[in-house]
Amino acid sequence: MTATRLAPVATATSRIANLYGPRSITDPVQAVLASVLPVEPVPQVDVTVTDDGRRAVGQVNGIEAWSIAIPRRRWLEALTGQIVATTTVVLRRLVFVHAGAVEVAGRACLLVGDSGAGKTSTVAALLAQGATYLSDEVALIDPDTGHVIPFHLPMTIKPWTARAAGPLPPGLKVATQGPVVFRLPDVLGPACPLGTLVVVGRTGRSEMTPISRAEALLRIARQPSSFRYPGRTEDAFRACARALRSAECLEIAADRPAALAPALVRRLHRRV
């Protein structure tokens, strides 16, 4: 597997969303989404922002899918998140899981955990240790092969995330909103088989312990994922079970999980 350098741009035909409205809003949103290319033939999301910038409406195939009030604070994160969520809902073949993902020595390491558990800072710390970026928010799994498919959405780096992660890997700042930076790592990884599933949690102790594949599957199913959508539960079970078939499953727990990144990378290399 060879990592590639991809420019964070997309043509009109390769975007996951079309945006209409004030450029002060649509331009930053498109900048954040530009590096995410369609992963299967799905309809684009058409998003219209009102002239006053207070509301956005999303349509799929000409049918309204949602309408949201745009918050005054962190509106860029909220609007891009809504569009990405719509993109995952319309998937018909691939399965999605709310997770971070990196590639080490040709195999993917998937990181799942509750919001605030430290996934983003751990992903950033793994990149600083030489891992290659696959995703920060959405991990895609091919049900036919069990491979993890890249979803190169820029990382959302908040001040506390940066403090927990330590030095960030080289990357492009594609947008900012207040203290939040949307950052796309320079080197983006390819699709690859799953090698390790890591459940990330915060606790006063610091440990890395093996868990069973059955427990790992249950932890995945608790996250926002294709498991939660009618008609996709069987696809999600089949895809995750196939991906986990030869994967090592771990739980890392620490007050700052990112601090365990060096030990985790050494363990990932030993599995090659």
Image (spheres, helix red, strand yellow):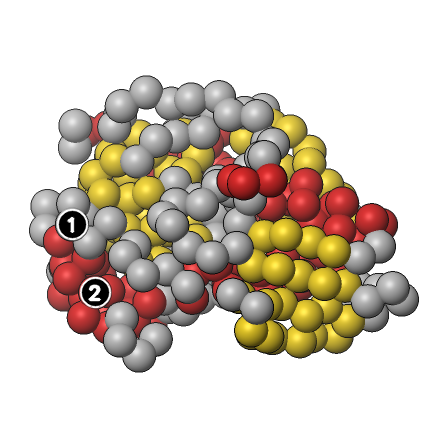
Q: Residue at x 27, y 57 (%)?
A: 93
Q: Residue at x 18, y 70 (%)?
A: 234
Image side of residue 242 versus residue 2, left or right: left
**Where residue 22 appears, x then y in whole percent?**
84, 55
Quarter of the rendering occupied by the N terminus: top left
**Where residue 162 appears, x then y in whole percent?**
63, 42
Where is residue 88, by image quadrant? bottom left
**Where residue 59 appears, x then y in whole percent?**
59, 68
Number of disc labels: 2
Q: Residue at x 72, y 63 (%)?
A: 48
Q: Residue at x 24, y 49 (%)?
A: 142
Image side of residue 108 versus residue 22, left or right: left
Identify the secondary structure beneath mark 1.
loop
Where is residue 164, by image quadrant? top right
Kind of residue indicated by mark 2: Asp
Asked whether residue 84 appears in the rendered view, the answer is yes
Image side of residue 219 versus residue 30, left or right: left
Q: How many neighbours does mark 2 have within 10 angstroms: few (below 14), some (14-19), or many (20 or more)?
A: some
Farthest residue to the left: give it. 245
Q: Nearer the viewer, residue 71 or 103?
A: 71
Q: Earlier in the sequence, mark 2 or mark 1?
A: 1
Q: Nearer the viewer, residue 227 or 161?
A: 227
Asked whether residue 211 appears in the rendered view, the answer is no
Residue 235, numbered label: 2
Residue 144, numbered label: 1
Asked if labels 1 and 2 touch by Cβ distance under 8 angstroms, the answer is: no
**Where residue 86 appears, x then y in whole percent?**
51, 64
* Residue 199, placed above or below residue 132: below
Kind of residue indicated by mark 1: Asp
